[in-house]
Amino acid sequence: MIAKFEGHYHGGVDEFLVSHAPSKAETDGGFRPVSGSRGTPAHVLENTLVLPFNDLAETEARIRGHADRLACVIMEPVERSYIAPDPEFLRGVREVTARNDIPLIFDEVMSGFRVAFGGAQHAYGVTPDLTCLGKVIGGGLPCGAFLGRSDILELADPRSGEFFHSGTFAGYPPAMAAGMATLDELEAPGGFEGLLEKTQNLAAEFERIVEQRHVRARVPRVGTVFSLLERGIFVKPAKPFYLSTAHDDAAIRQTIEALDDALQVA
Ligand SMILES: Cc1ncc(COP(=O)(O)O)c(C=O)c1O
């Protein structure tokens, strides 16, 4: 059995699609496994425990109640549509999983190299047992990576014969090269800091504009990720803004002007 959080997305796999975007009607009955795609086998639903993000008491109770059956707890430490974690909540999930010897997996496919260069785990000071990365680490080319506790990773060593892990594109050299080049650029003096500053400036401009136009809105952000939440006007439904080093001053100016124009019309 695996445990995952309602609303969290970890890729197009039956298990991880469970309750990744349930409708309101589907969640009215409480936190229960909801199929995320046609044809989900019954055993997948039976073997997925759904947890409530940022609700430590209920999460702890559910994990404790299934501790002897849980293979892992997986979560997006900063949910990709931007729901910030309560730091106490993250620490609590780390504690209850460690106490019950359940591997905790942080899916940092979205938050890695964005919330901080070291991802949400550095920003919040919580270390999972395994981490999944993607997107930024491939520098725009298809790439995924996982890292973490050596005793778990050693199971995937072909010599161990424990766990099959291979694929045509494993270690795909162009993606590795693009990823290394991207990380080098972010790690260069001023690289990530520049991106952070750009994000702060853009978010601050957004805040200034919504205030000036008397729009009820908030611009939550963490690291280089931020979104605009507003009643009635959604700049980008359910998705935050992700700035990259490719966004130059002209692109930022254009974004600010577009928001200003849009709010003026509204
Ligand atoms: C948080 C998160 N995890 C996992 C994935 C899945 O990555 P992929 O589409 O490469 O399987 C995504 C994709 O957007 C994601 O946002």
Image (tube, helix red, strand yellow):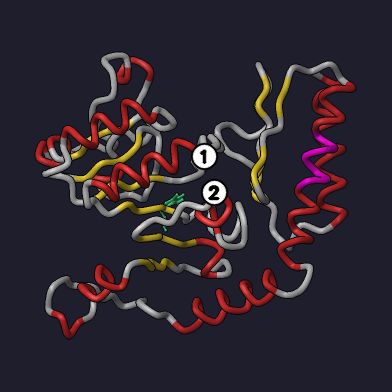
Residue to which mark 2 is pinned:
124
Report the side of 172 relative to 191 (left or right).
left
Determine the secondary structure under disc 2.
helix
Marked residue nearer the N-terminal end (2 or 1): 1
What x and y, as percent, mark residue 59? 31, 32
Q: Is mark 1 within 8 Å of ligand 1?
A: no
Residue to which mark 1 is pinned:
87
Q: Is residue 190 above or below residue 59?
A: below
Q: Crowdedness of circle 1 by 10 Å Cα count: few (<14), some, many (20+)?
A: some
Q: Which residues are magenta?
A: 200-206
What x and y, as percent, mark residue 244? 69, 58
- Any magenta on residue 43? no
Report the side of 168 relative to 68 (left or right).
right
What x and y, as percent, mark residue 108? 47, 55
What x and y, as percent, mark residue 231? 66, 17
Query: Dominant secondary structure of the magenta stretch?
Result: helix
Report the side of 186 relative to 155 (left or right).
right
Report the side of 14 relative to 7 (left or right).
left
